[in-house]
Image: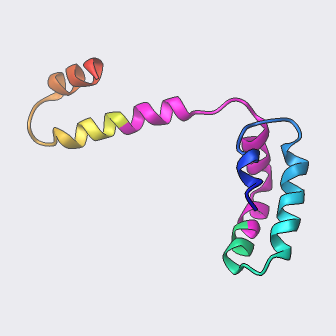
Amino acid sequence: MRSFAALLTPAEGNTDLLTAWITEARSVDLPHLHAFTRGLDFDRDAVNAALTSPHHNGGTEGVNTKTKLIKRQMYGRAGFELLRHRILLG
């Protein structure tokens, strides 16, 4: 079951490896793992794209998270100019 971690590095053959992993996971008596594999099958196209494409939006998501954190920290304390300044300096 540890072989799933190897799939998280995007590569061309990961679609076939994922199919093999799902088959192996379903042969084990772990109900939560079965629920996870059903979820993978439910949106298989998106899972295949995530496991094979080297492109992702992790950097954008990180910036969004940091901006929201700064906004929440400053809630009600200052205007837009200070918020803008802190975001640009951060």
Quadrant location, the C terminus: top left
As drawn, 73 above or below 1: above
Q: Residue furthest front?
A: 2
Left or right: 57 with respect to 89?
right
At a point 70% along the width and 44% down the height, the residue shown is 8
Nearer the observer, 26 or 78: 26
In magenta segment, residue 47: yes
The stretch in magenta equals 37-65
Q: Quadrant of residue 44?
A: bottom right
**Residue 11 place in picture, x, y as percent:** 81, 35
Q: Position of residue 61 (x, y in %)?
A: 48, 36
What's the coloring here? rainbow
Image x and y of residue 72, in percent: 23, 43
Instruction: Establish if 89 lies above or below 11.
Output: above
Residue shown at 26% from the left, 18% from the top: 89
Q: Main secondary structure of the magenta part?
A: helix
- Quadrant in the picture for residue 83: top left
Left or right placement of residue 68 versus residue 45 in this view: left
The furthest residue to the left: 77
Name the residue nearer the viewer: 4 or 43.
Answer: 4
Residue 71 lies left or right of residue 67; in this view the side is left
Q: Is residue 87 left or right of residue 42?
A: left
Q: What residue sits 68% from the left and 29% below the top? A: 55
Q: Residue at x 74, y 50 (%)?
A: 47
Q: Which corner quadrant holds the N terminus?
A: bottom right
Q: Is residue 73 magenta?
A: no
In the rendered picture of this protein, how many numbered marks are placed on residues? 0
Coordinates of residue 32 in the picture (x, y in percent): 66, 76
